[in-house]
Amino acid sequence: MKTPHAKRICNFRLKLPTYGGSYFTKKALKLESALATKPKVLHLEMIGEGEIPADTALLIRSILMKRLPGTQLVTNARSSLQGGSVLVWLLGDKRLIFQTQSIGG
């Protein structure tokens, strides 16, 4: 009988809209669910022009701090970061920033 194995890598996209609304609360719940699968690596990708409100950044931090000790967190910013978004990005064990390049000069 085979035993279920944890997912090796979990990709989680967090869009940073200019307006937050209930989007971040829903994403925080999905983040908890993603971590419940006990991944070895969680890639948290942040995209958009907006920012994470400070209260929501603290909520996301508390969720990420409860991950299993063996789960590596890779935070990837695909845009400039501001406000609470920076705090979430800094939580990564490995932090990446990818700049978008304009095409044609």
Image (cartoon, grey):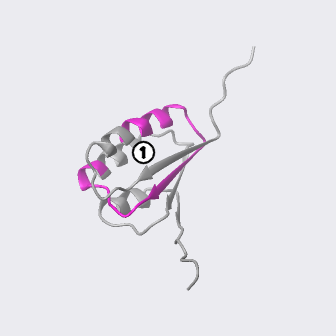
Q: Quadrant location of residue 54? A: bottom left
In what quadrant of the picture does the N terminus appear? top right
Question: Quick check: is 36 in the magenta stretch?
Answer: yes
Residue at image location 36% in from the left, 60% down from the top: 85
- The boundaries of the magenta stretch are 28-56
Left-right relation of 35 to 1:
left
Q: Which residue is mark 1?
A: 64
Q: Quadrant location of residue 79? A: bottom left
Q: Nearer the viewer, residue 92 or 46?
A: 46
The type of residue carrying mark 1 is Leu
Callout 1: helix, strand or loop? helix
Residue at image location 42% in from the left, 36% down from the top: 30
- Residue furthest to the right: 1
How many labels sit on residues?
Answer: 1
- Residue 38 in percent (x, y) is at 55, 34
Q: Against 21, is 49 above or below?
A: below
- Residue 92 in percent (x, y) is at 48, 56
